[in-house]
């Protein structure tokens, strides 16, 4: 029996399983896990700023696959996720919220924040997407300009309900 890694969200598999036979497979699963954390982080922030995200497994799979390609080449994004992982293990809510904000800044810096957001709301009409994109852009610009004060406060308040996000770090 050969070991496989299964990538799930809320108990549902959203990416094909990976046969863990070669070192490259282990690295691929690591990249998938990190991409999944990045996508979940963006979903969390979208929800705290008022964007309702009801996303299919197919949309998450596609979005995570695109993010995985960026993660492979971005040491800053990789380090941000690993730093967030350390904080998620025992940091305060404020430390966790600040680390999530740093992750969001890195997604913006890597040019993937809006790509992830659009992938997560791919079922929106073009008009609704334009409104959402404008609101997200304004929120992120304001957050970066203020070192995230208001956004970090909103994230702190949402962390109790972010169980699925916190659970992602158990395999990192």
Image (cartoon, rainbow, N blue to C red):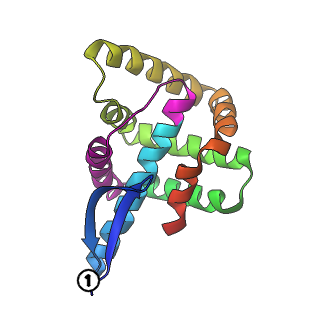
Q: Position of residue 88 (x, y in %)?
A: 63, 57
SS for tag 1? loop
Q: Main secondary structure of the magenta part?
A: helix
- Note whether residue 105 is visible: no
132 is within the stretch colored magenta: no
Q: Which residues are magenta?
A: 45-74
Mark 1 neighbour density, 10 Å: few (under 14) some (14–19) many (20 or more): few
Q: Nearer the viewer, residue 8 or 30?
A: 8
Q: Nearer the viewer, residue 117 or 52?
A: 52
Q: Position of residue 14 (x, y in %)?
A: 31, 53
Residue drawn at 27 percent across, 51 percent down: 65
Q: Nearer the viewer, residue 31 or 158?
A: 158
Is 143 displayed left or right of 134 in the figure?
A: right
Please identify the residue farthest to the front as the structure is shown. Answer: 11
Q: Position of residue 112 (x, y in %)?
A: 35, 39
> What is the quadrant of the N terminus in the image?
bottom left
Is 15 displayed left or right of 143 in the figure?
A: left
**Which quarter of the picture shows residue 89?**
bottom right
What residue sits right under mark 1 in the picture?
A: 21
Q: Is 130 drawn above or below residue 72 in the view shown?
A: above
Residue drawn at 34 percent across, 75 percent down: 26
Residue drawn at 70 percent across, 48 percent down: 95
56 is within the stretch colored magenta: yes
Numbered circles on residues, count: 1
Residue drawn at 65 percent across, 57 percent down: 87
Q: Is 130 drawn above or below residue 108 in the view shown?
A: above
- Note whether residue 21 is visible: yes
Is 79 displayed left or right of 6 in the figure?
A: right
């Amino acid at each position: 029996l050969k070991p496989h890694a299964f990538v799930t969200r809320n108990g549902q598999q959203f990416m094909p399983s990976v046969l863990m036979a070669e070192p490259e497979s282990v690295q691929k699963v690591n990249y998938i896990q990190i991409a999944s954390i990045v996508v979940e982080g963006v979903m969390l922030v979208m929800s705290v700023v008022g964007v309702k995200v009801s996303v299919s497994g197919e949309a998450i799979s596609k979005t995570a696959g695109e993010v995985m390609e960026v993660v492979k080449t971005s040491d800053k994004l990789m380090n941000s996720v690993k730093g967030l992982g350390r904080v998620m293990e025992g940091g305060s809510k404020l430390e966790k919220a600040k680390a999530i904000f740093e992750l969001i800044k890195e997604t913006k810096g890597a040019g993937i924040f809006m790509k992830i957001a659009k992938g997560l709301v791919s079922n929106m009409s073009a008009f609704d997407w334009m409104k959402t994109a404008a609101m997200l852009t304004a929120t992120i610009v304001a957050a970066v300009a203020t070192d995230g004060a208001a956004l970090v406060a909103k994230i702190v308040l949402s962390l109790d309900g972010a169980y699925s996000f916190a659970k992602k770090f158990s395999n990192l």
